[in-house]
Image (cartoon, grey):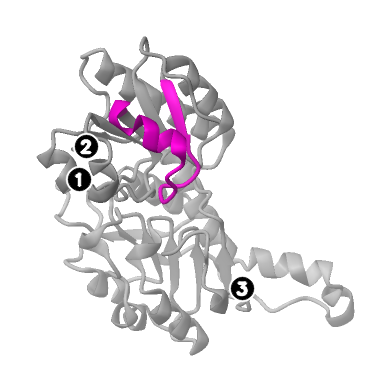
Amino acid sequence: MNSVPNNDKPCVLLIEPMPSWTIDRARDEFDLIVLPHENQRPADFVENANRIRGIAMPGFAKVDAALMELMPNLEIAACFGVGFDGVDTSYAMANNIAVTNTPDVLTDCVADLGMALILAVLRKVVVGDRYVRSGRWVAEGFMELNDSPRGRRLGIVGLGRIGLELAKRAEAFGMTISYYNRSERGDLSYPYFPNAHALAEACDVLALTCPGGEATMKLVDGDVLAALGAKGYLINIARGSVVDEAALVKALSENTIAGAGLDVFADEPNAPEALFPFDHVVLQPHQASATVETRTAMGDLTIKNLTAHFAGQPLPNQVA
């Protein structure tokens, strides 16, 4: 059904998926047009494209130059999430389109899931669940031993807000921390490595908490996985694009690495089916920030960025 223009409210395009309560709040604040997917062009969007002044979008939605060109009066793209790699920021900056995100409010939840994945793969939590449910405990006795996190070395790629919180959690489980960043942090005493390959050689668990985008595309390739080694684990709570998934499948198939915990994939929601049979892999549906509390806070901050812009106020979280 086509929306009836409300000229008293700024027209905003909302790209799903987003929580229903965030969409309801957005309807109260804006003349809202909902796009089920960034690739769709329903009549409601086409007929109102000239009126659209803002976008509310998941950070991974592909809002490229071609899409933004369809909205000549676009002023702001507000990302629902800390990541904003889905936006063509070069086009946005060249056309005076602000880009915002929602940092901080999701930091703890994402770090929590990162630690949960570390524990799940090392302690074989999912394997143990299946072992009990299938009756193998009764039939075969205790399952094989697993690995303790205590004493293991955690290497973090991207020691920003989320990476730092993951480090704190890992230290509580007796892990030692090192990291690779675009530049060394002067405020921390953790050992710094100049690249992902060197970090992988020096750690037992390699955790990815870095941004997505061209700069980190397939940063973790076959060479990095080989450096991680047969007793090493990969944890990805960043973006699927950071990992060469074909190389990862090969490494897992050949036991080049010990296992992986993955919350993100290159072509979501399509995770590589070649990963499905592996007992030493734990898969999640991109749900690191997916708690009611965090998603509510993310939605509130997305709307706050938009309302601040339309009111001519400083943007709470401008990234471009």
Q: Residues within 10 Å of mark 1 (few under 14, many from 20)?
A: many
Q: Tag 2's secondary structure? A: loop
Q: Is residue 52 visible?
A: no
Residue 172 lies, with reference to residue 73, above or below; the image says below
Query: Foreground mark, 1 or 2?
Result: 1
In three-dimensional space, the C-alpha distance between marks 3 and 1, rounded to whole angstroms, equals: 44 Å
* Label number found at residue 196: none
When asked about the image quadrant of residue 151, the answer is bottom left
Q: CA distance from mark 2 to mark 3?
A: 42 Å
Q: Which residue is at a point 58% across and 66% down the rendered structure image?
A: 282
Tell me, yes or no, whether the highlighted magenta stretch contains residue 182. no
First in sequence: mark 2 vs mark 3: 3
Start and end of the magenta stretch? 31-53
Q: Residue at x 35, y 54 (%)?
A: 209
* Residue highlighted by disc 1: 89
Classify mark 3: residues with Cα within 10 Å, few (<14), some (14-19) or many (20+).
few
Provide the residue designation for mark 2.
319
The one nearer the camera, 53 or 117, is: 53
Q: Quote the CA–CA distance across marks 1 and 2.
A: 9 Å
Q: Nearer the viewer, residue 264 or 124?
A: 264
| 308 lies above or below 60 | above
Instruction: Tell me, yes or no, if residue 111 can be seen here.
Output: yes
Q: Which residue is mark 3?
A: 146
Callout 1 touching callout 2 (CB < 8 Å): yes
Q: Secondary structure at mark 1?
A: helix
Closer to the chain start, of discs 1 and 2, is 1
Which amino acid type corresponds to the residue marked 3 in the rendered image? Asn
Kindly give the residue lying farthest to the bottom in the view shown. Answer: 254
Q: Is residue 314 left or right of residue 50?
A: left
Front residue of this view, candidates 186 and 72? 72
Q: Are marks 2 and 3 in contact (CB under 8 Å)?
A: no
The part of the image, by quadrant, that contains residue 59 is top left
